[in-house]
Image (spheres, rainbow, N blue to C red):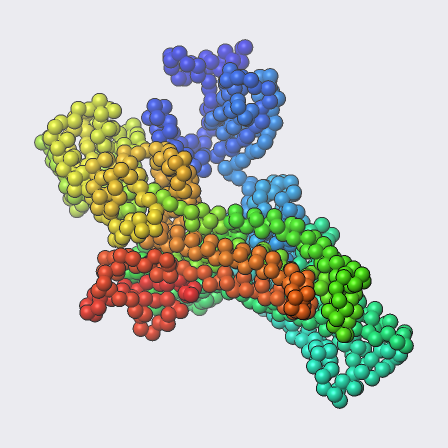
Amino acid sequence: MLALSCFRSESFSESRDFSPRPHYPSMPKYPKGFALKKPNNDQSSSSSSSSAAAAATAAASHLNTALFSVIGMTCSACAGSVEKAIKRLPGIENAAVDVLNNRAQVLFHPNFVNEETIRETIEDVGFEATLIEGKSNETSLLTCRIRIKGMTCTSCSRTVESALQVIHGVQNAVVALATEEAEIRYDSKLVSYRQLMEAVEDTGFEAILVSTGEDRSKIQLKLEGIRTERSMRIVEGSLQALPGIQDIDIDPMFHQVTVSYKPDQTGPRNFIEVIESTGSGRFKASIFPDGGGREPHRQEEIRRYYKSFLWSLVFTIPVFLTSMVFMYIPGLKHGLDTKVINMLTIGELLRWVLSTPVQFIIGRRFYTGSYKALRHGSPNMDVLIALGTNAAYFYSVYSVLRAATSHDFESMDFFETSSMLISFILLGKYLEVLAKGKTSEAIAKLMDLAPDTATLLTLDSEGNVINEQEIDSRLIQKNDVIKIVPGGKVASDGSVIWGQSHVNESMITGESRPVAKRKGDSVIGGTVNENGVLHIQATRVGSESALSQIVRLVESAQMAKAPVQKLADRISKYFVPLVICLSFTTWLAWFLAGRFKVYPEHWIPHSMDSFQLALQFGISVMVIACPCALGLATPTAVMVGTGVGATLGVLIKGGQALESAHKVNCIVFDKTGTLTVGKPVVVKTRLLKNMVLRDFYELIAATEVNSEHPLAKAIVEYAKKIRVEDESLVWPEARDFISITGHGVKAVVHKKEIIVGNKSLMLDSGIQIPVEADEILADTEAMAQTGILVSINGEVTGIISISDPLKPGAQDVISILESMKIKSIMVTGDNWGTANSIAKEVGIGTDNVFAEAKPEHKAEKVKDLQMSGLTVAMVGDGINDSPALVAANVGMAIGAGTDIAIEAADIVLMKSNLEDVITAIDLSRKTFSRIRQNYIWAFGYNLLGIPIAAGALFPTTGFRLPPWLAGAAMAASSVSVVFYSKMTVGAGITIADGNLVVLGSEILSDVNENVILSPTSGDSLLNGAFIGVNSDGCGSRRVFPIGAGYFS
């Protein structure tokens, strides 16, 4: 009680709040230097209005979230007592108790309180509490990526995924068969990436670390001249002494060292200098070729399968010739039929000798794969191949040995079956990995944007160039000064410190016109310098660069599984055991039918008996079944779809987004920055009181300069223009600044209360709006402009008219969406008059316009549409759009928007073009059409192939499928799925003579009759470059892509 009274007295003395509701000291005094964002004063009246920036605020504050299970609560009074007890603790930011689900969620500062203290507090109230989940915003959660070698089908990927998910500390694990990589989200405090790699290797596959997810860069260096272990230790010690070094891994066998480091403290050039100086010139170091990326491993796998296939041919071709060709050539047949021992012939002995290396040396991978799969209780394709080839091989061995020991037994061997089966499967795997490599061409194209070399400048203290040196672009470090010549690629993200030029950024931003660059402007790595020489200072290098982040996003998207893939995963669990049962049943049925004379004897080929016929049918069933085609049906199509999207400037964050987008039948558009350009400008000012315009704007700019809203920035920019040229651009101090989301701002400037905002803000503030102001507002809104009211000391003093022009092609996009049977809706925080004018201009009906909407209202509207049965996509660009982007089935963020909006979205439109909304939906529809076709093919193949292999056609037609041909069909089925997926078509979109043209799509509409489509000169149809041209040759010519080379 004494402690509680102390708390109350402290709260009373500090707050002086005499309201009847109880107050608890939710936070103690913070230590010096601990800064916390002060909430807006209006939050108490409208706490939900700040929800737009909730994610940003949580990320900015050092807060943790804990979720507790609370047992024993029976009513809201119980929940209230728990909530009050938690909020009394120091360091509690917020607490919410859900009595229905018996849970409590607590947001707290870990510097003042921890989960155990909160749990004990709940139990002190009289309830049982258990920590379910704790999340830190300064999180120890990392995302690790591991390349896995040796997976052959979905059963393999499911085995690895299951092994990773049971590890304590792993939150989520996804293993992608198509990319042969695992992405694991884990708590680094509970488990290390090394343990994750060990878990993968325990399942029987080779694990190669791609990234640990920690905020660090990694580089591989090749060492030369180091011959002893002592020299290695010296090099390791020298590198370890450098600042910013986090981890060093040395591989003496390959003379390779992998260094993880902080790029803002050191870099690869320093490592090379240290290594070479350590050995007094004897040691040499260079960046390891290809940097250990995905492509070298892919090429190694391709070479390995190609080599194995060639070696198998060396032995298999003679086996095939001796068993199926030479037997029909009289002279050769006599020689092969010559007896060696008893009934054993030279031909049989020759086939035995030649097929054995194929079975046990070249086919060793199938034995090791089968052992690993069976050890973990998840039989895969390797098990089917091993069983099928072993059955053929060992029956043949039995037959040959019996002939060697018998005087009258005529053997029938199947050596050609086992060897040809392995050869065809190796050919299929070779073609499959070759095709898989083609599906990931998008990432290779993105990586190719970066130049191979860069010109490094050395400057003196006065900034003069004293030396130029050409270096590998991967050796660029932070703060390096790089020279970019005309026509050269920008080697790194950075800022211009000297020179001026125009830079073509179309490959990153989609902006076709070169952008002017001068001192102080930022540049993006991979873009092309047009005409002038630039000196840039590197600001983001390696994994921090914009290009690397785009590549990482595409790779993550290709990792993510689409929900439709769950079907294949479920089937693969039972597929192989079912096929083994079917194979055994087929053999047994045919064997018993032959033994008991169920079918006539003339059905049996003259060179076989009933057992051998049954064995052939059983083996054929086992090897024709293909789990790979099912497993590859979805991931390969998703991989191609996301890759095509990336080349078109549409970044799709995984299979979930791709699957949801094809179902979209309603799109909600934000107005500012989405349908409009997003760069509003002041077009008119009307003063209702006598005062100097410069003084008027000085008061407004001082208030608005504290806001990040685009309209506020437009007002501040206009205010700068009407100031005297030599006048300081420092605005007067604004006190008591308040931002009311969706309404406007308030502040006190020069002891005058300034309110800048919309009509509702004025009314809420008790300010009378004159009739004249109402009329001006109506006229402004009728012209699709936004009217901003300005109040000084409680009186409306002026109206500012702001215009934000429509984006080019916005009307055509809405028209095309209508033809696609997709409903378009506009939701905006702007006033109704402006909203209706803009909607009318773009072609959205007034019934589908919702104005003066706060961020939470946008999210509520999205949910209402979903409740009505629509699949909703939200297109937005600002922080205030984030709740709606998250709530929608598919969130699409404009690439030029805020980081929070981009983070919240499922699809990022990098070019900021509205046309890309159609591109994303059309690409999604094509991809999922391809997935459905893949599944139809994969299921159809197995449903037709297995009965045919089992001999369903044999009684009526006499047709039977030899095992080697069944194996070839199996290999061809998985290859065909990969190649078919690669044919996914991307949609190319442009405006031709004011009309939208969509090619590579089922839509091709709204094109005037006088517009024809023709390939650009020098470009083939496969390159997909087309132009819209008037038939008289005088029309506009705009180039646009079709499917970025994926035209079919």
In the depicted view, which residue is nearer to us: 385 or 744?
A: 385
Relative image position of residue 68 (x, y in whole percent):
57, 28
Is residue 408 positioned above or below 508 on the image?
below
Relative image position of residue 570 (x, y in whole percent):
61, 48
Residue at the location (66% across, 47% down)?
Answer: 163
* Left or right: residue 377 compared with residue 503: right
Tell me if residue 106 can be seen: yes
* Left or right: residue 97 compared with residue 755: right
Relative image position of residue 744 (x, y in whole percent):
26, 33
Relative image position of residue 519 (x, y in whole percent):
30, 56
Residue at the location (43% across, 53% down)?
Answer: 924
If the image is split into quadrants, where does the C terminus sit? bottom left
Residue at the location (53% across, 56% down)?
Answer: 936
Residue at the left extreme of this rendering: 690
In the depicted view, which residue is nearer to us: 618 or 186?
A: 618
In the depicted view, which residue is nearer to us: 390 or 235?
A: 390
Is residue 750 positioned above or below 190 on the image?
above
* Left or right: residue 38 compared with residue 767: right
